[in-house]
Amino acid sequence: MLGTCLSSAHAVPRKVILLRHGEKANAYALCAIGQQRSLALRDTYLGRNATNSVLLGGQAPAAFLAITLHTLELAAPSAQSWGMPINTYAVVPLDGGGAAVPQELKNATSIAAADVLTNPAWHDRTVVMTWQHTSIASARLERQNPGEKVTLRQLLNLDQLPGVPKTWPGKNYDYFWIVNYDPQRSAIPTGFEMVKQVYAPPFNTLPQNDWGAPLPKDYAAGCKS
């Protein structure tokens, strides 16, 4: 058993950056605010020439991961700036406008999390996961699936750390979850931090509500809340 634990630890990343997709217009596309957020993320935090490279530690990420069309659209500018593809675990709505199927989200999230913790190409590096918020953390989803790991909070072992929120609020599009590992030792995180997205002009008008707080009163009518 010890040998198995040690060999699996050799593929653990040093850092996982989790964030939710941007503000959306419908089941398929981001609204104008969400599109602006994708550019703001590239220019400020996640792109090759980002003005604030602290999240990436001045290094290129090992991979960008996405699951839905919204998450793919948000991650695209940042990944393109590095000349990198996006690893997609595709779940799309197929009923003419409804949400993605919960079981498909569960399956894709489980596969992605397993890849993150076992892919030797990502060992000791940073992986960026742009994801669907209830699949990141949802107390309700976890209660509905007792005895099964269904959220990234569980699958990436964040539930073994104190202070990690059990739910990602539906009104928050403006946070990162930073998950740190000791890649030589274990797939259990050694640290967790929530970082709020803060932008200078021309992106300073993007919603920057605090964790759990409502969206601004002037939130654009063309974006779903």
Image (tube, rainbow, N blue to C red):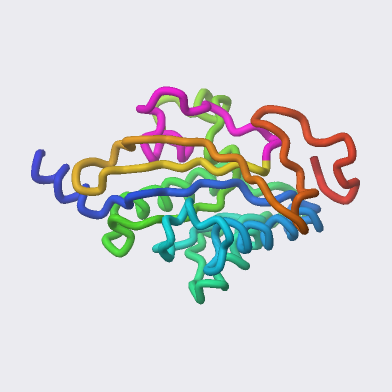
Decide: is 112 above or below 167. below
Which residue is nearer to you in this view: 54 or 102? 54
Whether residue 92 is visible: no
**Residue drawn 56% across the image and 31% down it:** 138
Report the predominant secondary structure element of the magenta stretch. loop
In x, y percent, where is residue 91? 58, 55
The answer to which of 39 and 69 lies nearer the viewer is 39
* Range covered by the magenta-colored residues: 149-172
Q: Quadrant of residue 11?
A: bottom left
- Could you tell me which residue is drawn at 77 percent across and 58 percent down? 202
User: For this view, does 81 lie left or right of residue 124?
Assistant: right
Q: Relative to the observer, which residue lies in front, 64 or 201?
A: 201
Relative horizontal placement of residue 223, taking residue 82 as reference (left or right):
right
Observer-nearest of 81 and 31? 81
Q: Which image quarter: residue 125? A: bottom left
The C terminus appears in which quarter of the rendering? top right
Q: Is residue 167 visible?
A: yes
The relative height of residue 120 versus residue 198 in the rendered view (above or below) is below
Q: Quadrant of residue 28?
A: bottom right
Left or right: residue 19 compared with residue 125? right
Residue 170 within the segment the image draws in magenta:
yes
Vertical comparison of 61 with 220: above or below: below
Q: Residue at x 53, y 40 (%)?
A: 136
Q: Where residue 17 appears, x then y in whole percent?
A: 47, 49
Residue at x 76%, y 48% (from the top left corner): 206
- Check residue 108 for magenta coloring: no
Instruction: Decide if residue 195 is on the left or right side of residue 94.
Output: left
Residue 165: x and y, percent?
52, 27
Q: In which quadrant will I find the N terminus?
A: top left
